[in-house]
Image: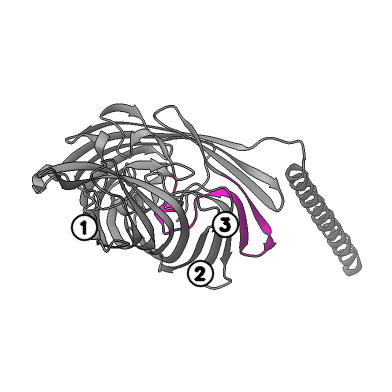
Amino acid sequence: MNKLIFILLLTFSSQIIFAQENNIEGLSNRVSELEKQLSDSMNKGNSFNPAISVILDGSYKNYSLDPSNYSIAGFIGSSHAHGHGGEETSTETALGTNGFSLGHSELMLSGNIDPNHMGRITLGIHNDNTLEIEEAFFTNTGLASGLNVTVGRILPAIGYLNEQHRHTWDFTNTSLINQAFWGEEGYRDDGVQLNYVLPMENYFEIGAMKGRGENFPGTTRTNGLNSNLIFAKFGQDLGFSSSYRFGLSWFSNKVIERDHEDHVEREIAGEETEVETENHFENSNSKTVGFDFVYKWIGDDGVKGLTLQTEYFSREEDGNLHFAKDNDDISDEEGTFTSKQSGYYIQAIYRLTRTLRLGYRYDKLDSGTWTFVGEAGSSWDDLGLESLAEYNPTRNTVMLDYSPSEFSRFRLQFAQDKSRNITESITDNVDNQITLQYIHSLGSHGAHQY
């Protein structure tokens, strides 16, 4: 009897082992098959199936001051959304126009090229029916763990906001300091950027870029690698509910020739006369230092949340200035100049429910100090450029947005803008700005940055 039981147990055990071996072998074969399918799909040379997404953006705007003559007092080139090549993309100012209008729509195509490369192109569609290549690059991710090399036209890692696409902004427009230093659409450049995430417990990324440098604050050029960027980012989780990230950046560029139209008051034939000037800033060096900080908290319910964000930039420039006037009674002047300007913003976004957010942002700029040493002994005060007179622009903005899903958003925004230096009366400088905006996303869309 015992022998019979032993034989039965031995037979049953061998069947179990045999079944397990077959099961393991089947799973192994299935894994190998899936790996082969993935490899084949990534290496098909004739395959063209990128992820396609479209951003629809439109708004209704109402300004108490005329948006067509907008510029930030004390800052060069702040009136327009700077396009590629340092030129203005259209005759439309950075504020847009009163009434209904299309905003900044986008068409994006992205996908894997092979196991070590991915590519993306982003086309911006502007309100004046112009089309612009905002991004067009490929990234090599196969060099080493944590190391990425990106080549093409990109949004460099200058601060925090510059890397973000416009539809991800928390307000309908960019901050005053970003607009004054990089343009309403942000700084873009053609070049090579290297990013390396260090193998550490906390997030620590360093990087550098070398670019053509012809976008503002640079100018159009025929050759050369004139822009340089070095940056570092550090971040950390604070428990399960909050995290932070701060960054440092240093950017430099060469300015071949930047034109700036202005007005001056001069006494001609015994009368004060307004004279138009065409000023040429030539062979200049531009250096910008930046600091950014972001803190995020989410409540225990997973719904309520708070985001604090700030950026600070300081820029120094020096070079030659040709001061040309359109009046024969006044002679032109040549000399050297220096300038130092800065600014910051701070904002808070509070998520009330899964669909509602409330936000506030404060902007402040310092037009800083300008010096001019003319060949004839004249100074900056002697030039008397009206739009570059000393001034500290400010702006207060509040917004409420409603997102019925992750693919759509409606926003109401009010801003009290004091960035224009129109007259000596501060009340004449106040521009009350009301904006109603919609943003819709169609198609495949990747995750946004931190």
Residue type, label 3: Leu
User: What element does badge 3 sit on?
Assistant: loop
**Of callouts 3 and 1, which one flags the residue occurring earlier in the amino acid sequence?**
3
Q: Residues within 10 Å of mark 3 (few under 14, many from 20)?
A: some
Measure how far apart labels 3 and 1 are at the Cα level: 36 Å
Quarter holding the C terminus is bottom left
User: Mark 3 against mark 1, which lies toward the viewer?
Assistant: 1
Depth order, front residue of 355/49:
49
First reached walking from the N terminus: tag 3 or tag 2? 2
* Residue 11 drawn at (x, y percent): 89, 60
Q: Which of the pair 241/319 is nearer the observer? A: 319
Name the residue that disc number 2 marks: 204
Q: Is residue 389 magenta?
A: no
Please say whether residue 430 is visible from this viewpoint.
no
Q: Where residue 263 sits: x, y (%)?
A: 23, 44
Q: In the image, what residue type sits under mark 1?
A: Asp
> Residue at image x 61%, y 64%?
146
Q: Which image quadrant: the N terminus?
A: bottom right
- Outermost residue toward the bottom in this view: 200
Q: Label 3 vs label 2: CA separation?
A: 27 Å
Q: Quadrant of residue 224?
A: bottom right
Q: In this view, does 215 lie above or below 242?
A: above
Q: Which residues lie in the magenta part?
A: 136-165
Say whether disc 1 or disc 2 marks the residue closer to the N-terminus.
2
In three-dimensional space, the C-alpha distance between marks 1 and 2, rounded to whole angstroms, equals: 49 Å
Q: Please tell me whether mark 1 sits on a helix, a strand or a loop.
A: helix
Instruction: Kindly identify which residue carries mark 1.
Output: 382
In the picture of the structure, the residue carrying the numbered disc 3 is 225
